[in-house]
Image (tube, grey):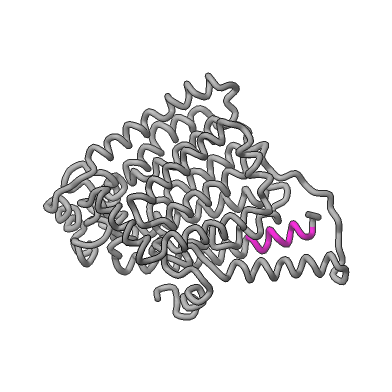
Amino acid sequence: MFPERRGAFIAILRLFLLLVFALTAYEGLDSWQRAYPWRSGDWMINYSGGFIRRGLLGQGFLWLWHTTQLPPTLAMTVFQLACYGIFFLFAYRLLAEAPEPGRYALLVFSPAIFLFHIYDPHGGFRKEILVYPLLAWLVWLRRRQGRIPPAITALVSGLLFPAVVLSHEMLVVVWPLILLVLLWDAPDRRSRLGRAVLLSLPSALATLAALHWSRVDPRQLLTICHAWGPYAVPDCHDGAIAFLGSDARLGFGQVLHAIGAQRYLVVYPVVTLLSLLTFWPVRASIGALLRDGWPRLLVSASLLGSLTLCAVAVDWGRFLDLELISLFLLSFLPGVAVPVRPARKAGPGTMRGVARRLRLAGMLVFNTLWHIPHVGLNFFLGYTISRVLLGLHG
């Protein structure tokens, strides 16, 4: 990419991310004004009824409300927007510093990375946004400095990620990818294995604690819900808080129903294929990332974890988007960047210039024809256009 095209792409990227963040803020303010059973309830799980899975962050918001009188829905909204904002910032810096950022155009402007929560707000604003800024920051740090300081490694493995797991145990599926970034420069297999076991212990203990306290009784559920007083979700018997009383068998039954009623085995293979097509221009980076056995093993472990989640939860779109965003970020690790092509300038009237404009038009059309539904709704043009025309809250 020659300089003027690179500068234009970076300028467009900056405007695009600012627009997406503005839409994110607009949608986030809706959660401030009213609590949704799933989208808000996910962040309201707390320890009022005793220690349970997923309660750490909600307990923090509850303490903040009692200490400062700050409306908890406002604190949650600000925190969610901060997660998105930090993710956007470091993703932008990774793209701006990449040798050929234009190779990411199809991926960046697709529904797969930055627009998932815009097309499907009730699938966004969930606790997986905790790992996006963390992973983006670590990859940027690794790329910028070539190493991650031991203090940061200790902070992430010993405190931050265990806190993430205690806020939602499903996010442990991302730990192999965090570990990949932390140990990217480990010199040999024995060193990697020993450090991997040591760094994984706190998150493993947090996961075991979450699984041990995985069930709650109806009385605890009401205590958790009523702890929010006037800010509680409208129905304590519906949503993320009520779902704490369910088990894997119920989740598996819901998945079977969704496969039959919502064509999951048609929708998600197609959506996955469309998403992977957006990675085609950066396939060399993905191939370089997966060239060695160690990264391939950790990426496979994360994918296997997400596939396991798909057996007990219907939010397949969320799990897919979690893996896609993680793969996008990992493609910026040192040593896997796409080599720079020789610049071949083409004037606007040449065949190459016309072909470039046709590719741009095709990219824009392709990216508006689909999106990733978080629970298997229609992903084609009609649904996308109708959401734009009817507004984000339709």
List the single residue furthest toward the bottom: 389
Residue 150 on image: x %, y %: 51, 27
List the single residue furthest toward the front: 260
* The C terminus sits in image quarter: bottom left
Residue 108 on image: x %, y %: 61, 58
Q: Is residue 45 above or below residue 31?
A: above
- Compared across the picture, whether 287 is left or right of 48 comes to right
Q: Is residue 346 above or below residue 349?
A: above
The residue positioned 36% from the left and 31% from the top of the image is 202
Tell which of 215 and 220 is nearer to you: 215
The residue positioned 42% from the left and 48% from the top of the image is 130
The span shown in magenta is 4-13
Tell which of 263 and 382 is nearer to you: 263
Q: Is 148 inside the magenta-drawn segment? A: no
Which quarter of the picture shows residue 207?
Answer: top left
Q: Is residue 269 visible?
A: yes
